[in-house]
Image (spheres, helix red, strand yellow):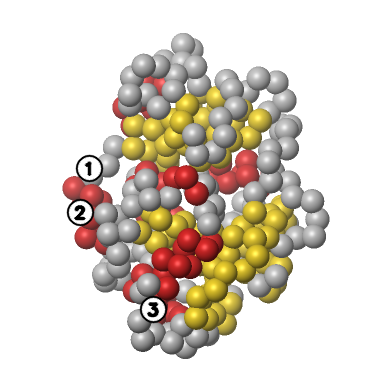
Amino acid sequence: MTYVQPIPLEAAIVRLQGSDALAFAQAQFSSDVNALQIGTWQWSAWLDAKGRVVALFHLVYLNPDQLLLVLRGGDASRVAKGLARYVFRSRVEITTLPALPLADADNAQAFSVNGNVNDLTLGFDSYAVRIGSPHAANSQWRHAAMQAGHPWLVESLHGTLLPPALSLRRLGAVSFSKGCFPGQEIVARMHYRGRHKYQLCHVMLPSAVPPGLTWTPSSDDEGNLVVLDCIERHGDLHEALGIAHERVIETWSNEAENSPLKVLGTFPT
């Protein structure tokens, strides 16, 4: 299958450094940071008090005193400034690093980390991403990420979505047993009561939609698809990862022949 090269993505990076870096991250982020081993990474997020995702990232544990937040979209300066408000007496320094290009790499074991802060390779099992590669960026890893339901969150969507819409529990980015973190009470209540109805889905679209925008096939307010990433195929079709109401996704799937889009897969909340 051939794809037209989309606009390349870059990875903005926030670095936490200091003897309290791990404890600070455990208190602030939604994942169980204490479960990380040196030389590995995990999915994680930083939520606001209402449980909405203000940063989505790969949390990379390079050494005992250093963690990297490799953002999956978003502004590193905004995240760093926001986190700095909660440092208080913690021995942790928060800095931003220059954004780095992303490219394909040879498949690597899930959650593995190879390289250093200037040239990292993260493994996902079915694909791998090289961050800081001197080679030209390419899009094949983005197609694999869509198939796997690995969301990208552009700056305009930060603070607008709840973890279930991004399928973060499935990815291990949310822990309900680690204790308190910002937004934890709301997210836990939603999880145990099953109230969230918006779902991550992999679809084929008839037209290009830039990430962060909404595609509306009908006048139904709930019939919208919030696009997280979109790759053009040769021809008139575009592959995308997005979020829609579960009722609408079911309608699109049941009426595939008449639907303006094709649902290729869905991912649990």
Q: Residues within 10 Å of mark 1 (few under 14, many from 20)?
A: few
- Circle nearer the N terminus (3, 2): 3
Question: Along the polypeptide, which appears first: circle 3 or circle 1?
Answer: 3
Which quarter of the figure has residue 20? bottom left
Name the residue beneath numbered marker 2: 189
Q: Are marks 2 and 1 in contact (CB under 8 Å)?
A: yes
In percent of width and height, residue 180 lies at: 26, 69
Q: Name the residue that disc number 1 marks.
A: 195
Residue type at mark 3: give it: Val
- Mark 3–mark 2 Cα distance, whole angstroms, equals 27 Å
Discs 3/2, front: 3
The answer to whether residue 232 is left or right of residue 71 is: right
**Count of numbered circles on the image:** 3
Q: Is residue 159 above or below residue 180?
A: above
Distance between mark 3 and mark 1 Cα atoms: 33 Å
Which residue occupies the foreground of this view, 106 or 20? 20
Q: Nearer the viewer, mark 3 or mark 1?
A: 3
Q: Residue at 44% x, 45% y: name it.
A: 157
Q: Position of residue 198 (x, y in %)?
A: 34, 37
Q: Is residue 53 above or below residue 117?
A: above
Pick whichever, 4 or 40, lies toward us: 4
Vertical relation: 90 (above or below) 119: below
Residue at the image position 30 percent from the left and 71 percent from the top: 178
Q: Amino acid at mark 1?
A: Arg
Q: Secondary structure at mark 1?
A: loop
Q: Which residue is mark 3?
A: 87
**Mark before the other along the chain sequence, 2 or 1:** 2
